[in-house]
Image (cartoon, helix red, strand yellow):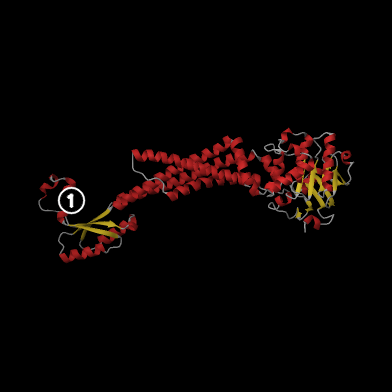
């Protein structure tokens, strides 16, 4: 059986090289596009995740709070669900921070410090989405003693939209690419099978099972897909190394995704071969 | 107990009231009935278009009869499924006028293919392939390409391939159609010898006189009917 597989594969590589290459190139290009999309998607998600993790909620307290009121507010804030840490800053620390941001000259004419005391809150990871931030915001605004709460709501909304756009555009584009590459592999594989139709018919007469007849095509389809994925991954890595080194910081595909990527290419090759060869290798007893 | 040893003379092949109609218009066979037992040599004669090839196609179940039934060993045209077809074909040998050899491999590999398909490999396959090539007289040509053989040698190779898996039944559809008289006689003689070895052989020809010299049952088809 193994000898039969290798024999047929070598025959195709020798005698139908152009057709085999067409199928391989179709798989290679589609996997390259898919890999680029994955790289972009993963890095946009990583960037978005970084922005979210650095986002804080700024809480400004009312000016005239007694010590006990401040302690009460502090307890409520620190115990609030979703708040990972709360960093308190006094009026003076707030002024100092403003000086550092805007420069001494900008606040020279202020006179009395108008800035309130407050908190910078870091949010727990599982709350770092639009709904999580909004929930914490709503709780904070209901606490007596808190004057104002600010966080990057509009930035979060924009990030969500960009993420959704990339995801949905990718799905649509991915489906179209998948269908296109299946058609290419199907057509190429159909040509390959047709070139051996005489051999197939003789083997049927000799009692070859469907599996025996079809396995060389499935073998060729699977490994074409696998090698096409491998080569596209190599090219992607070269591009990535060049871009990441020179222009921006990026992450390459993680190991589990790499294996899935390779298997996906192999699966497409296998599927195309399966669909195209079935008609020729099926035994029929016609009426 | 070996299957062939367990069946009686009339049980290997049974053709019962078989009719074959194409496109609801043309009747190729009408009410054909006969049976064949182990080791019989059956001569199927009739003019071109009388239904000989159609009958043989129904026996190796490339097509089903429109009416009636054919039983070959445990297989019936009424019950066989596509999945069972390879199992039947492994117990049959079929030889054609146009040889149907594979030019991408040598003589030995052509015979070996039939064995490989049945899962017979290694020394056992080599031994059997060598044996059948010896039976047909092609041992010296084992490593030649079929395209380099004469017509008679090509048909011998086709017979060797058909014989490789020790078939119950060997069907030869006009095996001498492409051959001169000398080679044709040689092929018929070989097929007759195979039947004497225990394989049931059905050989068809439109030349009655070609099959006269060999002892065996004669079936004459005319216009799709056995007369």
Q: Residue at x 40, y 46 (%)?
A: A41
Task: State the image coordinates of residue A86 (x, y, percent, origin top left).
Answer: 24, 59
**Relative to B198, residue A184 above or below:** above
Quadrant housing residue A248? top left
Task: Inspect this view and state whether residue A230 appears.
Answer: yes
Task: State the image coordinates of residue A269 (x, y, percent, origin top left).
Answer: 54, 44
* Left or right side of B22 for A190: left
Number of numbered discs: 1
Task: State the image coordinates of residue A242 (x, y, percent, origin top left).
Answer: 38, 38
Q: Residue at x 33, y 54 (%)?
A: A130
**Relative to B102, residue B118 above or below:** below
- Please state which of residues A51 and B84 is positioned toward the viewer in this rendering: B84
The residue labelled by disc 1 is A97
- Please state which of residues A196 and A131 is positioned toward the viewer in this rendering: A196
Say few, some or many: other residues with alpha carbon within 10 Å of mark 1 (under 14 / 14 to 19 / 20 or more): few
Q: Chain of mark 1?
A: A
Q: Residue at x 87, y 41 (%)?
A: B211
Q: Residue at x 64, y 47 (%)?
A: A212
* Left or right side of A13 for B218: right
Task: State the image coordinates of residue B2 (x, y, percent, origin top left).
Answer: 77, 57
Task: Inspect this view and state whether residue A191 appears.
Answer: no
- Please state which of residues A138 and B56 is positioned toward the viewer in this rendering: B56
């Amino acid at each position: 059986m193994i000898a039969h597989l290798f024999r047929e594969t070598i025959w195709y590589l020798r005698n139908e090289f152009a057709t085999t290459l067409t199928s391989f190139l179709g798989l290679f290009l589609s996997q390259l596009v898919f890999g680029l999309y994955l790289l972009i998607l993963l890095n946009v998600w990583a960037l978005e995740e970084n922005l979210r993790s650095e986002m804080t909620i700024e809480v400004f307290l009312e000016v005239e709070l007694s010590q006990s009121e401040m302690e009460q507010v502090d307890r409520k804030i620190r115990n609030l669900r979703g708040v990972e840490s709360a960093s308190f800053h006094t009026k003076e620390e707030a002024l100092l921070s403003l000086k550092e941001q805007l420069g001494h000259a900008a606040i020279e004419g202020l006179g009395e410090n108008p800035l309130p005391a407050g908190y910078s809150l870091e949010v727990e990871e599982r709350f770092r989405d639009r709904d999580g931030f909004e929930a914490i915001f709503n709780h904070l605004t209901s606490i007596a003693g808190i004057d104002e709460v600010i966080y990057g709501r509009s930035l979060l909304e924009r990030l969500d939209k960009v993420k959704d756009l990339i995801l949905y555009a990718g799905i649509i584009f991915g489906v179209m690419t998948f269908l296109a590459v299946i058609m290419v592999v199907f057509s190429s594989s159909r040509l390959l099978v047709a070139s051996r139709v005489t051999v197939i018919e003789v083997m049927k007469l000799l009692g070859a099972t469907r599996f025996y007849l079809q396995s060389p095509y499935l073998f060729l389809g699977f490994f074409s897909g696998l090698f096409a994925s491998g080569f596209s991954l190599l090219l992607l890595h070269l591009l990535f190394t060049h871009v990441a080194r020179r222009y921006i910081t990026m992450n390459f595909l993680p190991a589990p995704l790499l294996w899935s990527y390779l298997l996906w290419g192999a699966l497409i090759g296998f599927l195309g071969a399966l669909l195209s060869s079935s008609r020729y290798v099926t035994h029929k007893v016609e009426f | 107990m070996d299957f062939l040893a367990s069946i009686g003379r009339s049980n290997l092949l049974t053709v019962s009231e078989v009719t074959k109609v194409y496109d609801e218009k043309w009747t190729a066979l009408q009410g054909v009935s006969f049976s064949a037992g182990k080791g019989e040599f059956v001569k199927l004669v009739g003019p071109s278009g009388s239904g000989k090839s159609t009958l043989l196609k129904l026996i190796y179940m490339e097509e089903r009869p429109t009416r009636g039934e054919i039983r070959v060993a445990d297989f019936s045209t009424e019950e066989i499924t596509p999945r069972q077809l390879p199992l039947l074909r492994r117990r049959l040998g079929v030889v054609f006028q146009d040889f149907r050899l594979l030019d991408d491999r040598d003589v030995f590999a052509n015979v070996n293919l039939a064995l490989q398909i049945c899962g017979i490999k290694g020394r056992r396959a080599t031994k059997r392939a060598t044996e059948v090539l010896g039976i047909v007289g092609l041992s010296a040509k084992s490593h030649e390409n079929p395209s380099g053989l004469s017509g008679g040698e090509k048909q011998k190779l086709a017979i060797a391939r058909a014989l490789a898996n020790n078939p119950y039944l060997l069907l030869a559809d006009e095996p001498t159609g492409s051959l001169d008289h000398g080679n044709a006689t040689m092929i018929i003689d070989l097929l007759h010898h195979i039947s004497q070895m225990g394989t049931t052989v059905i050989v068809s020809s439109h030349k009655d006189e070609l099959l006269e010299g060999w002892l065996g049952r004669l079936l004459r088809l005319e216009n799709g009917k056995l007369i």
